[in-house]
Image (tube, helix red, strand yellow):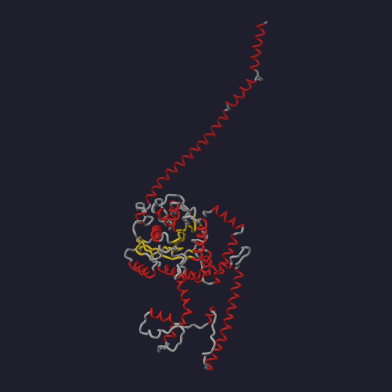
Amino acid sequence: MGDDCQYYDSRSYNSLRDSDDSPTLSNRHEYRRVAYPTKKEERQRRSTFSVLAKFFIFCTGMIVFCVLMYIPVYNKASNQLTKDLVVGWSKQTNRDTKVYVQPNNVTAIQEPRNICNKHKQNKLFLLIVVCSSTINFDSRMAIRETWGNYKKYLTMSKLYHAVKEKYKNYNYSYDLYSETADFINVTSYRSKRDISSFSQLLPELAKALQDNLVKDKTENVPEKRFEDDDNSMLPEFDMNQELGDQTEIPNYDYYDSNVMKIPPKGYEDNPDLEKVLNLLRKDKNLKENLPKIKEEDEVGNIDPEYKVVFLLGLPGNDNDSAIQNKILEESERYGDVIQEGFIDSYNNLTLKSIMMLKWITNNCNDSVRYILKTDDDMYINVPNLIDNLRNRSRDFDNKTRGTRAKEYMLIGDLICGARPVLDSSNKWYSPRYMYGGRVYPKYLSGTGYALSSHVARALYDAALRTNYFHLEDIFITGMCAGRARPRIVPRDDPTFSYQAAGGPAPAACGAHARATAHRVPPHTMRLLTRLLADKRMLDKCERMRLTKMKQEQHRLYVLYRFLRLLVSNEC
């Protein structure tokens, strides 16, 4: 009985364990279904893995193949490059700038005197250094006659500040300039001017005919003068032609004068200037004129705000002595030429700029505050530039009052994200052995940039520690500025531009609104000076500038500029 019960229990246990309802058996079946898939599922899984593996192996093989094919082609192309694609600077050329600059020696062949006077207490505010080619005599002469002429600067500065003062209270709520309105005003002005000219001209012609018929004396006739705008209505008069017909030498002894006689009585045979001046001082009629003469002398003796010098190298051909002789004559006549002993070429522009920094450091270290480096095809709006630098100097002096802080200012037209040009036919070609980076550092356009005297010394010291690179603006304002001590950050200034000037009228208003204008030939330089000396043209340009500023403050324009910065390399 007991055995039967034991057998029953064992059988019952086994039956329960082996039954379909047993949880152990159920889990075992589920485990078997997951761990051991069917042959069809296994075949599909292996097929998927094999396709992915084959695709990965194929891609890897193609990448390796392309790399292996590119390496010999690249090496072959590199070997085919000539060694001196950058003329004068091959792979074997020593690029240590100290070898060419010779910092411990005086390398200037000729240099001006009294440009930077170290003994004067007042510093020269601005020194403009024009990097000019040896053969550009016309460009240098045009600069001396236009924006480099200090007398013309004084006149144009008065007009510039007068028109600025006229519109200083403009609140940008309306447009100052409209092309339609200005066209109507100009047309009506010209018509009125022509009518007034005829109304003045006809009575004068009638009176002249009447005088000829009656043959009366004209000594007591009051003098009539035409306005300056009416010179076009007057007949042409050739002074040389009229005087050429005279055969008798006129006698001037009968002319009475309250100034002097030519020569003064008693000094006909003794043209001693000191005695003549002493005689004039004793004349009672001249006493009232002496203060005016003194004022004119004082104005002429005022220290100028800026000076202009031209930096040149040597002519390219060793046997070209004619150009060198003309440069020597030019230097002796004007006294504003700095000539260094290197070959003047495009690939040596960096060397020219380093020589500029060297000359300023050695001759104008503490006697000048700002320096402008520019080219001989640039028109410089000197009143605009000096006004800009005055504001910057005033802000710096107010912030550093009572301290001996040094001013590190480097401003111009900032260029960002520029990449080396690998096309050997391009003007700005840069081979790998000259610059191995992918992107140039931020730099200022070499057409014109302004720097303080402390920056000039810092850049000069950095240039002596930096390998030569033939693109001047990238080397000076990018590489050397980054390696200077302290590090100098080039800043963008909207008044500087390397864009071409364009036509006469747009160029005039562009030159008025900015400090620099590029690609200006000598004849256009003279034309711009005449246009900017016209009050009406200057007034029109100022209204155009303010109206454009008002339009740029619009929200849509601000959004446009923001989107343009995102998709372009602008700074």
Q: Measuring from the top left, give residue 223's x and y in whole percent.
A: 53, 86
Q: Based on the displayed image, in which of its 4 quarters is residue 244 positioned? A: bottom left
Q: Is residue 317 left or right of residue 447?
A: left
Q: Is residue 510 visible?
A: yes
Q: Quadrant of the N terminus?
A: top right
Residue at image x 60%, y 78%? 192
Task: Return the x and y of residue 44 as percentages of the image width and height.
Answer: 56, 32
Instruction: Name the residue rendered at 62%, 23% in the picture.
Output: 27
Residue drawn at point x = 52 percent, y = 80 percent: 231
Residue 81 is left or right of residue 184, and the answer is left
Tell me residue 404's x, y (percent): 47, 55
Asked where in the image residue 476 lies, by quadrant, the reply is bottom left
User: Where is residue 236 shown, x and y percent of the image?
Assistant: 49, 82
Whether residue 347 appears in this view of the structure is no
- The answer to whether 392 is drawn above or below residue 291 in the figure is above
| 46 versus 325 height, above or below | above
Could you tell whether 199 is left or right of 89 in the image? right
